[in-house]
Amino acid sequence: MDHFNYKNGELHAEDVPLSRIAAEVGTPVYVYSSATLARHFNVFQQALEWAPEHLICYALKANSNIAVLKLLGDLGAGMDVVSIGEYARARAAGVPGARIVFSGVGKTREEMKLALEGGIRQFNVESEPELRALSEVASGMGAVAPIAIRVNPDVDAKTHEKIATGKSDNKFGIPIARAREVYAEAAKLPGIEVIGIDMHIGSQLTDLDPYRQAYAKMADLTRALRDDGHDIRRLDMGGGLGIPYKRDNNAPPLPIEYGQVIREAVGDLGCEIEIEPGRNIAGNAGVLLSKVIYLKEGEGRNFLILDAAMNDLIRPAMYGAHHDIVPAIEPAPGADVSAFDVVGPVCESGDTFQKGTQLPSPDPDDLIVFRSAGAYGAVMSSEYNSRPLIPEVLVDRDRFAVIRPRPTLAEMISREALPDWL
Ligand code: LLP
């Protein structure tokens, strides 16, 4: 459920008509709903209510605007970061290091050092070279790094191949068959404290079975490692629960059902539970608001050319992803619709959001909305074709604020420099 609904014939974010944001901030623009972000976070809290100790570590790769992080942090969220840049954002949003988990396959020594200095809840270690590097960095500082080892359970997450991470041919984690050996090494290393196990099998999962398979393996591994003498007291179950991108009846399982799958698999182990949802919290809490520039008649097809492009929202071009595209003005019941190929101004055919979209004959300057764009939207945008990064707006009931302004052309260019020989 989200808070983007038609009211008085116009699509609103909570109590703010999107047309008002377009008029005041311009388009294209990302618009997020505070109430939806909070609701999704609270739904996960309920899903894990059974676990006396748990922490929802929002995966901020999905949407890392510091206003979004502050809102979630104030509700008690922890953060899952994958770079020191994300760590800095979480800290800038007021989240203490004790609630920040550091994931990722390629942490540098510099990143490890900065996170240890700033305070960190746990490193999710993904390889033996990383484990040894962390041991050297931490012991060199006279510090102890709390770790979970990310274990790759070799489970097919049944999602898009670019975002599946739990198969043995993916770059992530340590093969489960070798986990005991690696934990044994970790236990002996200076500057390392083993506290748990981590898994993350992929993103946009629409079926709970892969989780069941992976978490059963995690439960077995917890018992085996305890038998080996390790004090396994925290389980990081990863993120990845999918969201409905289409308003049909095929919605993925709900967080509450997902919480029960975790409970059934590991609920009797007495461990603290962590999860790392990103998309499920931010995805349907945001839309991309754009404007029609031209309608162009092609050979047997009509193109709707928008002011938003693949550089602003790359998911359709990159993954063939679907985002519902709707007009900001509610179509009259039974209004005539025609098919359009919805495209942006970028100079490649890949800049096509959707083909054959049914829309009630739009006019230039009409507002067009991409739903479910709050996750992996703004964070994946670029300035390709020298299109400045688009602004982000946060709505809270009847008020809104620009939480990332649109840079001017001069600002965009001024980040570059001419060498002194030119
Ligand atoms: N934890 C780890 C270790 C991850 O790698 C990810 C996502 C998450 C948590 C959060 O997963 P989520 O709950 O958001 O599914 N750009 C792609 C998605 C990439 C996901 C990468 N890892 C997309 O637009 O679909």
Image (cartoon, rainbow, N blue to C red):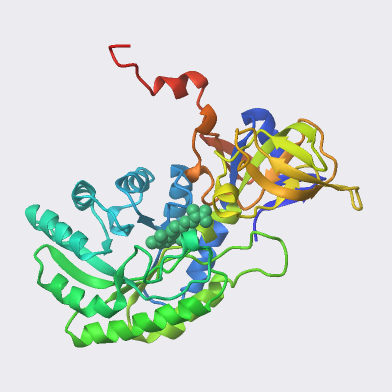
- Looking at this view, name the residue that lies furthest to the front: 299
Q: Quadrant of the C terminus?
A: top left
Above or below, comparing residue 269 to residue 301 in the picture: below
Q: Choose top left, top right, bottom left or bottom right for residue 243.
A: bottom right
- Residue 129: x, y in percent? 19, 61
Residue under the image location 77 percent in, 35 percent down: 366
For this rendering, which residue is in front, 323 or 267? 323
> Quick check: can you spot residue 417?
yes
Total numbered labels placed on residues in the image: 0
Residue under the image location 51 percent in, 75 percent down: 258
Above or below, comparing residue 359 to residue 29 in the picture: below
For this rendering, which residue is in front, 147 or 381? 381
- Residue 331: x, y in percent? 85, 47
Image quadrant, ligand 1:
bottom left
- Residue 265: x, y in percent? 42, 84
Q: Is residue 187 left or right of residue 27?
A: left
Q: Choose top left, top right, bottom left or bottom right for residue 222.
A: bottom left
Q: Is residue 88 left or right of residue 315?
A: left
Q: Quadrant of the N terminus?
A: bottom right
- Residue 395: x, y in percent? 60, 43
Q: Is residue 230 left or right of residue 383?
A: left
> Quick check: can you spot residue 387?
no
For this rendering, which residue is in front, 157 or 74? 157
Residue under the image location 30 percent in, 77 percent down: 176
